[in-house]
Image (tube, rainbow, N blue to C red):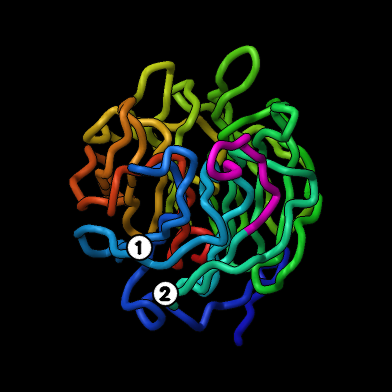
Amino acid sequence: KLEIYNGDQWFEIDSTSPELQTGGTRGVIMGGLSAGHPNGDNVMQFITISSTGNSVDFADLTREKYASYGGIASRTRGIMPGGYYYNAPAGPGTYTDEMDAITISIQSNAFDFGDLVQGNRAEPGSAANSTRGIIFGGTDPSVTRTNTITYVTIATLGGGIDFGDMSGGLFQNPTGTSSQTRLVMGTGEGSPANFNSLEYITISTLGNGADFGDTSVTASYRNAAGNAVRGIIAGGYSPNSDNAIEFITIATLGNAKDFGDLNNAVGGMTNMASSTRVVFAGGRTPSEINNMDYVQIPSTGNAIDFGDLLSTVSNAASVSNGHGGLG
């Protein structure tokens, strides 16, 4: 391996690529609420982000679950942290601290990664660089929103470790996007109202979030993804479904700017990114949909049809092996 020093810290130069591993950047949609599975699904499905077309079956999660926003991934491994599931057949529902993991290049069932350290959490946000995955916000079994931030080392198996706290408040369903060094997170459902604030952390350190700026849309159930330069934030409920797409420049501080519009006003979707493209999948309009849209990250403009999911899906997690945190 090759490492470079930027005057502050060392960075490993990635010697693998999505093209070598999966024939292009692969996006995997994990679980969610789907047609015929109103209490959560265990189905995973995948797409090749550089193409267009319908999703293909990947394999199954360890259990049927939903409400895990974002996702953690290196070039090789994807992780779905936390979520919510029902004790079949009738419930009650359970917040889970489980983390499922997959090898992105291999179509096989998920395996146990470890547990979140700060208790059971549904609707957390998450993002990553090639080494470390960050889980933030969410709700716990007492339906109390949290501002905790947890990290995991993606290459190993084990429980989460305390990172710090979000500074903007107690967040449910926040969203985030990252470069190799910085993660920008925020928006979501709070008390007494939704948030439009964004904050950031330096992924390789420990500590609390610091103010980044604001989005123009104040909404819950938004989603974000991007490349190493630009993050794309879209959709949400404010309180009705929204079709706005905004962007931020991750290395700077400042408010989000208008990018364009989704083809549908939708909340609760999931996003996957390559170095050039973001794909938006599923969600509610308020009924669940199976649509996928995409945008080209370096440009601005309205979303374009990508294809369809295997079924209608909302509140799913997703990962890719070519997102901005991987450079």
Please report the residue visible at 63 percent of the width from the left and 48 percent of the height from the top: 82
* Residue 207 in sight in this render: no
Residue 190: x percent and y percent?
A: 62, 21
Residue at the extreme front: 89
Please report the residue visible at 42 percent of the width from the left and 74 percent of the height from the top: 107
Q: Residue 107 got which mark?
A: 2
Residue topped by disc 1: 46
- Residue 256 left/right relative to 259: right
Residue 305: x percent and y percent?
A: 18, 46
Bounds of the magenta span? 84-99
Q: Is residue 91 above or below residue 144?
A: below
Q: Is residue 239 above or below residue 80?
A: above
Please report the residue visible at 51 percent of the width from the left and 51 percent of the height from the top: 64
Q: Is residue 129 above or below residue 136?
A: below
Magenta-colored segment: predominant secondary structure = strand
Q: Residue 88 got which mark?
A: none
- Residue 242 left/right relative to 321: left
